[in-house]
Amino acid sequence: MTAVPLPLAGAQRCPFGPPPDYAELRAHHPVSRVECPTGIEAWLVTRYADVREVLGDPQRFSTRPGTGSHILAGYAAGEPGEGDFPRMDGPEHLRFRRHMAPELSNMRRIAQLRPMVRRVVDERIDALAATAPPAELYADFAKPVTTAVIAGMLDVPAADHPLFQHAAEALFAGASSGADVAAAMQPLFEYLYGMVAARRAAPGEDVLSRMIVRSDQTERPFTDTELVRMSAGLLVAGYDTTASMIAHGVLALLEHPQELARLRHDPTLAAAGAEELVRYLGVGGGLLRAATEDTTIAGQPIKAGDYVVVAIQSANRDPALYADGDRLDIGRPTGPHVGFGHGPHQCVGQQLARLELTAVLAALPRRIPTLRLAVPFADIRFKVASAVLGPVAVPVTWDGIEASGEGGD
């Protein structure tokens, strides 16, 4: 089968979903051969059921190549290093996840974080109110919200935020090389080594301290390098992936004013709206796996060592999942989408991301009822060849901002 270029989302023709090619692929070529931006060839899996099959079976499909290595040149290379848990399978991966999940996914922990997240969102809206419009929603609102939340959880002072912001921007930029990423990450790693040493000496109530204390009670405590890489992963991923989703989601709502009006009039729809935006927008570049054995997907033979890209956006728009999957409906009953992945490697921070996005959707339309784009939609540029999709910038304006108050979630 001849490989064709991997269809990439993010262009103006498909700002909120997969390129039109995917409907044809789902219907007639559910597993097809593609050439990816980094030069590797892979099998592209486009149907919902097949995507869940691949993601749910780590014995047949490994994450060792790195989930974004088909898009980002500097994302991963060689064997996983010490603490590089996203590229580990089986018990090795579970060892890390057991310590991170209580801080990011446990519903009791999320309930504890909710007041802080709401406060951060309101403070950032207050900051917008203190300036004259227009503003840039991605840089002036979304990034400060997610930065404050994740840095607050790790007790990183505001003066040190640029360290992980710079690392995230280098990591997720499609043009980055391995050397570029290493150079951007090195200052952050050096900083975190100092933080790990300080937390070991005097544990506090932050996420890193609790992971150190919990790990030290096990038969195999985390090394300093493992803790550094875990913390770096939390800071980098928690900063930009959720910020991009917030900016992308609000832009989608501005282009679907009826849905935005529903949220404005009923903030209790925010949780369902957050879930729907994750489904609707998805992970544009897909996720990479490698077959560990000769197998088949939807009848297509796959050889051991072959790369497989699961098309998350395509799966979430599959008519087999929702007959009207191309429609944005913030009141849609929650369903089994794969916007956060599926199986043992699904996003460990998904509950925190849901919490942040829900808080934004509950507060922003209510407090800024006249929020609108400050430029024509045609002027909005979108990230391309990036594992984290969304608009490059979202210039917005408004007529007034209302005082903070309790919103629904």
Image (cartoon, rainbow, N blue to C red):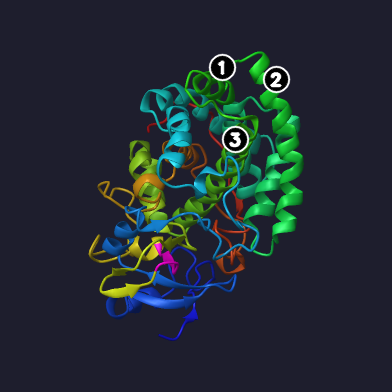
| Nearer the camera: disc 2 or disc 3 | 3
Cα distance, mark 1 to mark 3? 19 Å
Q: Quadrant of the C terminus?
A: top left
Per the image, the residue denoted by label 2 is 198
| Number of marks present in the image shown | 3
Q: Measured along the vertical axis of the image, is residue 51 above or below residue 333?
A: below
Left or right: residue 52 versus residue 187 is: left
Which residue extends farthest top? Answer: 202
The disc at residue 238 is none
Q: Measured along the vertical axis of the image, is residue 151 above or below residue 219?
A: below
Disc 1 marks a residue whose amino acid type is: Glu
| First of labels 2, 1 by sequence position | 2
Q: Quadrant of the N terminus?
A: bottom left
Cα distance, mark 2 to mark 3? 15 Å
Q: Measured along the vertical axis of the image, is residue 55 above or below residue 209?
A: below
Marks 2 & 1, CB-CB < 8 Å contact:
no
Cα distance, mark 2 to mark 1? 13 Å
- Label 1 CA crowd tier, 10 Å (few <14, some 14–19, many 20+): few
* Spot occupied by residue 402 in the image (x, y as percentages of width and height): 53, 33
Per the image, the residue denoted by label 1 is 205
Left or right: residue 302 versus residue 402 is: left
Disc 3 marks a residue whose amino acid type is: Glu
Q: Secondary structure at mark 2?
A: helix
Per the image, the residue denoted by label 3 is 226
| Nearest the eye: 296 or 387 | 296
* Spot occupied by residue 210 in the image (x, y as percentages of width and height): 53, 20
Q: Is residue 389 magenta?
A: no
- Magenta residues, as a range? 304-311
Disc 2 marks a residue whose amino acid type is: Ala
* Spot occupied by residue 192 in the image (x, y as percentages of width and height): 69, 32
- Label 3 CA crowd tier, 10 Å (few <14, some 14–19, many 20+): some
